[in-house]
Structures are given as C-alpha cells and as structure tokens.
Amino acid sequence: MRASAWAERSDRVDVLAAVLGWMNDQLLKMLWLNDLVGSFVERVLGLPLDERLGASVQFYLYDVIKIFVLLSALIFAISYVQSFFPPERTRKILGRFSGVGANTLGALLGTITPFCSCSSIPLFIGFTSAGLPIGVTFSFLISSPLVDLASVILLASVFNWTVAIAYVLVGLVLAVAGGTAISLLKLERYVEPFVYAAHLADADLPEMTRRDRIAFAWQAMTDVVKRVWVYVLVGVGIGAAIHGWIPEAWIAAVLGERNPFSVVLATIVGVPMYADIFGTLPIAEALVGKGVEIGTVLAFMMAVTALSLPSLVMLKKVVKTPLLATFFALVVTGIIIIGYTFNAFGGLLL
C-alpha cells in the first residue's frame, strides 16, 4: 500500500513538473516563437540559421518580440498592484518601522516600483523630506531600479528561475546592506538642506476604482514601453552582434574566467551606461552564450541599472560629495563581491 501511494505521489510530481516545465518553456521563454522566427528567417528571408547573419537576425527578432510581449504584460500587471501603493502611502508604511527592518521593507517596496535609477530620485527626495531615515531611502533607491518583479520574470525567461531568484536575493541584500551602512555612518548632514525643506502632500488619498486602476496600469505600461523601447532595440542589437559576430576567444580573453579582473572590468564598463535592465538582458544572454561567467554578467547588469552615470549626476544635486562617494563605494564593492561569489558557485545556477 505504501509503495503504491509513493508511486502515485511520484507520478503526480512528474506530471506537475512536466506541466510547469511546458509553461516555462512555451509561455515564459516562448520557445515556440523562437522556432517560428527561425522558420521565417530561413524560409522567407532565405538566411541559413547556421551562418552568422541568419543566427543574428533570428536572435534579434526573437528577443525583441519576446521582451516587448512579456514587458507589456508584466508591467501592466505589476502597475495594477502598484496602484495600491502610491508614494504617500508607501511613505506612511515605511514610517512605521525603524532599523534594519525599515531598510528591509524599503528594499522590498522598491521591488514593486518599476522605476529606473533616475526616476527613483524624486521619490528619494520625497521620502527624505518626509522624515524617513536616509538609510531607508537609500535601500529603496538601490532596489527600485535593480530588482523589480518584471525583471525577475524576464531573467527567468532568459536564463532560469534559479538565476532569477538568486539575482533578487543578492539585489535585496545589497540594498539592505547599503542602506544599513549609510544609517550607521550617520551621514544625514550631507543631504542638501532644500531636500528637508520639501514636503509631500499629506492629503487623504482618494480610493481608486477598478477602472481607475486599469487605466493607471495601462498608462504605466505605455510610459515604461515608451521609455525603454530604444534601450531594448539597442541592447538586443548589441546582443545579436555578440551572438553572431564576435568570436568566443575575444570575449573569453576580456571577460572570461582566465581574466581575474573580469568582474571589476564589467562593473567599470557598466557604470557610465544608462539603460533599464530590459535593455541589458539581451547583452547578458549573448555574453553567457559566449561563455562569460554568470557573476561577471550580473555585475555588468547591476552596474548599469543601479549606478548609471545620469542617476549619479542627478543624485549629486540632492546630496553632498561625501554621501555620494560613500553610496557609490558601497554599491560598487557589493556588486564586485556578488560577481565573484556568483562566479565561484555559478555552476550550481546554470
């Protein structure tokens, strides 16, 4: 009887695993789309997929369509949820906590706000002016562009769920650790005085109807797509070029495991760039396909999204140099540590 029960349970687990695997491959990774695009490239465009041009065109068309479909659906769904957490309500929630718990909550709330590093700055000003500790606002500032629910699902569609979940965890740890360190260093005096003079409106929040929330989600989706479409097209283009035209030996020499400074180099290259994670994912996908270690790739992605040069310039307008330098040093150090850690254990993730 026990053997029969175990066999039945095992069969159910196998069926569930098969169903989840099919959903992951066909709905998330959209492998059917890859096959369809491959047929189009080969039969309609007449480009063999085993040659550079054909492989690059297939990579480009497949990734562009997949990213925009997933991005639109995910941002709509996430923004609908976000409609329950406008800035003033978020500030009130954060104001109930203190210490590491407040930093953790700030980082977690950052994951449901799909902002780029630059658009997070106004919220940083609002939260700080409302009296929240700057450590909490910095935890939010780090996690908001670095880790959001849409990027998690897109990461899973490109790599796998293990990589996506690991990325979320290390991103949250970085946000909490960075904010906590800034709190302990007591750097409030390096925030520009006008930030504390500004105030968010404290009016009662009108309750949104379902139609209002759908309209809000639709507007947020279209705003995000308008903001990132160029980065997606450029990012996929770079990824397609890497995928089809740059020899693995070249990439391995610069960013491969034989170069002990690959993580540092990837971080340095990523900081001056400005793009959402949606534009960096195709580049990351192509680099991993060329044999670059996952930690090096994630370090590049984190540097681009959390430490873009435009966001640092904007942040300099609201904080003084010692605080900006501390923030930069903490995040860069954290990214480099994360990169080398992932490289050491990357075999367990891919």
Image (cartoon, rainbow, N blue to C red):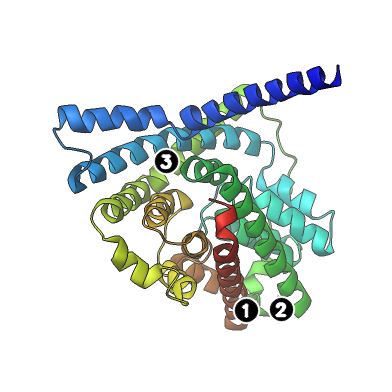
Query: Could you say where residue 148 lies in the image, as x and y percent from the top left?
Result: 59, 47
Disc ID at residue 187 = 2
* Position of 257 relative to 156 (above/below): below
> Which amino acid lies under the numbered mark 3 shown in the image of this protein?
Val
Nearer to the camera, 319 or 62 = 62
Disc ID at residue 225 = 3
Seen from this angle, which residue lies furthest left? 46
Q: How far apart are marks 1 and 3 (CA)?
A: 33 Å
Can residue 198 be seen in the rendering of this structure?
A: no
> Which amino acid lies under the numbered mark 2 shown in the image of this protein?
Leu
**Image point 48% across, 65% down: which residue?**
296
Can residue 15 be seen in the rendering of this structure?
A: yes
Q: In which quarter of the image is the N terminus?
A: top right
* Snapshot quadrant of residue 83: top right
Nearer to the camera, 308 or 295 = 295
Label 3 crowd (10 A; few <14 / some 14-19 / many >=20): some
Residue on which the image places disc 1: 326
Query: Could you say where residue 120 lies in the image, as x and y percent from the top left?
Result: 57, 57
Of mark 1 and mark 3, the one earlier in the sequence is 3
**Image point 18% across, 46% down: which residue?**
53
Disc ID at residue 253 = none
Nearer to the camera, 32 or 182 = 32
Query: Could you say where residue 348 lies in the image, as x and y percent from the top left?
Result: 59, 54
Mark 3 secondary-structure assignment? helix
Of mark 2 and mark 1, the one earlier in the sequence is 2
Label 2 crowd (10 A; few <14 / some 14-19 / many >=20): some
Mark 2 secondary-structure assignment? loop
**Image point 69% across, 49% down: which residue?**
109
Q: Are marks 2 and 1 in contact (CB under 8 Å)?
A: yes
